[in-house]
Amino acid sequence: MLDYYGELDAADRDRVRTHLAWCADCQHADRDLRVTLRLVDVAPVPEPSESFEREMWARIEPHLRVEPVARPWTVRLGALRLRSGQAPGGGTRPWTRLAWGGGVAAAIVLAFFVGRAGQVRTPDAGGARPAAFQAARERVLDAEVGDHFERSQRVLTDLVNMESATPVVLANDQQRAADLVASGRVYRRTADALGETATSELLEDLERVLLDVANGSAEPTPREIESWRERIDQQDLVFRLRVVGAELRRRQAPATPAY
Amino acid sequence: MHESDPLVVARARGGDTEAFRVLVERHSRYLFAVAHRLVGNVEDAQDVVQETWLKAHRQLANFESRADVRTWLTRITVNCAIDHIRGRRYRELAHDPADLQQGPLSERAVVAAPPADRLVFGVEMQQQLATALTSLTTLERAAFMLRHVEGLSIDEIGNALDLRTSATKHCIFRAVRKMRVALASFAGA
């Protein structure tokens, strides 16, 4: 299969093909595999109804009131809060009860979008904006994301250290996780907007785990807990949160005067 | 007159909602097919397409005018489908180590294949194929389709689905193995 998809390195590919050249059984299996995979190409997909496009538009149109470009920062902020917990179909996901957390985060990062919205309206304004203003905006993000990482670290540490042999109830942790997902998404957008790639990637990795915890069972099985632990360990999430959090704190510290 | 996609996108970026509607009408059906291959059912595929459009609308400003609109939308759809799958709790099925140690292929008929002489290519084969695909777990289906249809590498799929490389390979192996069993009659014909 890996050969079919071109996933083998040269040495393995040669080995597989040499073997195929003389082994009749494997030739047969290889032929079956290729035929099967070609059959998949014609897998049927149900045809949606004739009114599918109209129905789709009806589902999304109510959410498109905000223009995507050059809109005032007040509208952008409102849109951010709306999107934090929006479910397809206009409903809300279970954790939207804490969408206010995302809203608060949106309010905190308002400063960035004030700047960005200003740039959209007057393209030259960004260049003329004092560097100190930009630096101040970035410091606000650093402080808020640093705090977000600290709170996330506490949730993950609790999970990692949880006693999986005894029954646990995660309701409070799930609420914390849901809150962090909502605010983390806002921070991630801001980090993206500012080109803070490393922070954004960490926020994304963090969000995946927190989302699973928030959407998971309130009384997880030992296996579920173990699965979360594995993911946290595999991605070195706690360690990365510490490292990036420390870096953010370092950046916030006032520069030592040169004299 | 048929306006080209880049021009429609340019209008949509300027806040023209009607232009965005044109995009929705042009591409929704195709995106539904992409989403359905990955998530495996109509309702989820519709949700994925809806989420795709909402995300596309938010990201219009980032769209590069040189890029192909459908390719851009397809990428968003794949990402939305992956997020959708992550939100579902089928992962443990695909992680079951016992599944990796099951017996030989011949003993693992996941879908009972009708005798070959009763089958003809065409509608019946497509039905069998559809049944075979439904026998895959959500994760197996997503991993397999991302590899087979979307052409993502094993590493890319692993990153997308939060799986280690070995787990990703096993996931696709299991999917292919089930497909082979289910389609044995056709593959041998």
Image (cartoon, coloured by chain):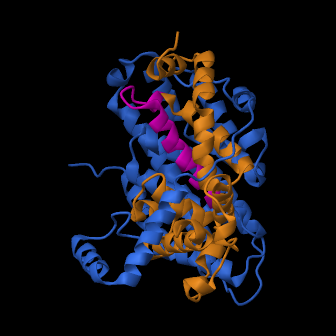
Colour of the chain lettered B? orange
Q: Quadrant of residue A123?
A: top left
Q: Is residue A227 above or below residue A104?
A: below
Instruction: Write the residue at 49% across / 44% down.
Output: B75
Horizontal side, residue A160 vs residue A3: left or right = right
Q: Position of residue A88 (x, y in %)?
A: 72, 42
Q: Is residue A33 visible?
A: yes
Q: Is residue A66 above or below residue B87?
A: above
Q: Is residue B153 above or below residue B107?
A: above
Q: Is B26 or B125 nearer to us in this picture?
A: B125
> In the orientation shown, which residue stands out farthest toward the front?
B117
Image quadrant holding the N terminus of chain A, namely: bottom left
Q: Is residue B189 above or below residue B7?
A: below
Q: Is A134 or B7 nearer to us in this picture?
A: B7
Q: Is residue A86 rendered magenta in the image?
A: no
Q: Position of residue A147 (x, y in %)?
A: 54, 56
Q: Is residue B97 visible?
A: no
Q: Is residue B84 rendered magenta in the image?
A: yes
Q: Position of residue B25 (x, y in %)?
A: 63, 26
Magenta stretch: helix, strand or loop mostly: helix
Instruction: Write the residue at 60% across / 83% down.
Output: B99
Instruction: Write the residue at 42% across / 16% down.
Output: A122
Q: Which chain is blue?
A: A
Q: Quadrant of residue B186?
A: bottom right
Instruction: Write the residue at 76% across / 80% down.
Output: A168
Q: Is A149 or A94 nearer to us in this picture?
A: A94
Q: Which residues are magenta?
A: B61-86
